[in-house]
Image (spheres, grey):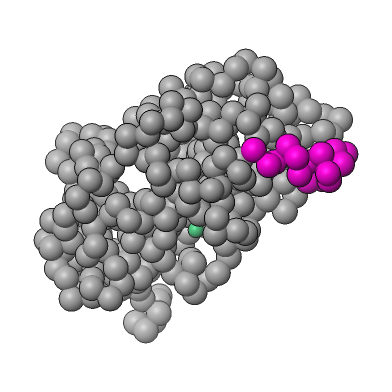
Amino acid sequence: MNQPTHAWLAVEAFRTIQRCSTTDAGKQHQLDKLAALLGQHLNDVVVAAWLPDALIKDMTYGHVFKTSKYDGSDGTRFIVSRADLKKGLAPAAFERERYLDKLPDSWWAAPYRVKDNGGHLPTRVTSLCQNARDMLKMGDTDLYGQCGVTIPAGHAAIADDLLCSSRDVAVMMWMTSHYVADAHMPFHCDNRNLASTSSVKNAHSKIEELWGAQVPVLLQAKSIGAATSDQILAAPLPDKSNFAGFSSANEIPPLKSGGDPWKEAVNICRASFALSFSLVPPEVAPVDDPSSSIPVSTRRSLASPPSTVIGSCAFPRSLPGSTSRRRDIRLRPWG
Ligand SMILES: [Zn+2]
């Protein structure tokens, strides 16, 4: 995703936190304090949510979880049934569940595993979550004052110039949002050629280009610096944006898997991998494993359908109101 799209997703996450802070569950989890912390630094969101791409530059391993078929001897370890995967996903977060249902049982019966060099996305998610939590405990007095959080025991031992400001913590959380968003992008979790970003003409890049054109113009690094939180939250979507009417969940479900962000992220990535096959079925583009014994020439021919059908700007033409049923079906999750 491009910079404005990542910023827009982070702003929408903030909007959800703010809205949910008034519910009973939100009050119980003190979401109003989190909203207070993030809300005063909303104009950092464009730069901060983009730092992983602009500064950290761990895209090839930190932003992806490239999964493919598994040919090893202990394949049963890497079979995740549809029912088990659904149990590991937050119900409200996955409108995509109905897309998981579109995949045949045979797809679910096969073993899939992240490639050895397929990426550390869940690891990045959990490390950043923990960093943000630690930084909250190392906050300066302004942070505690602004957010109404009790200063934790042991805090007095930290030198003043080591303490974190609310802005430091907000930036860490905006950065975290980048990796969480990438985990939800189906092509970040699919090892097929169509999911590669090595060519600007492929489906992955084209779809992300389309998304970037459909978020508020205000969410550009140059224009947002002086904007207030109210202006950012009120920024209109462009005309004919497919995100018009988008509404996020009315509640923030607790993490599954015993509250482990790593396991949660692995399950999200696995669901994204499945969703990728729901969008572009295996009969169009088979599970492509470059390390398998399939000859290179055969793999090239197997991979050609997506690169010709999808990579030739078919997605941009078909986004709002496609005349092609096949394309329309594939695009529905974002349409
Ligand atoms: Zn990324």
Picture mark count: 0
Q: Quadrant of residue 27?
A: top left
Asked if residue 291 is among those painted magenta in the image, a careful observer would answer: yes
The magenta-colored residue range is 290-305
Between 215 and 178, the residue placed more toward the observer is 215
Asked if residue 56 is among those painted magenta in the image, a careful observer would answer: no
Q: Quadrant of the N terminus?
A: bottom left
| Image point (27%, 43%), residue name | 243
Relative to 236, say whether 54 is above or below: below
Between 35 and 136, the residue placed more toward the observer is 35
Residue at the front extreme of this rendering: 323
Q: Quadrant of the C terminus?
A: top left
Left or right of residue 212: residue 19: left
| Image point (70%, 41%), residue name | 303
Left or right of residue 333: residue 40: left
Between 308 and 214, the residue placed more toward the observer is 308
Q: Quadrant of residue 216?
A: bottom left
Res. 17 visible in picture: no
Residue 25 position in % (x across, y down): 23, 35
Residue 264 position in % (x across, y down): 50, 39
Relative to 46, say whether 201 is above or below: above
Res. 24 visible in picture: yes
Residue 318 position in % (x across, y down): 40, 39
Between 143 and 299, the residue placed more toward the observer is 299
| Image point (77%, 34%), residue name | 70
Magenta-highlighted stretch: main secondary structure?
A: helix
Left or right of residue 305: residue 176: left
Residue 152 position in % (x across, y down): 33, 61
Residue at the top extreme of this rendering: 105
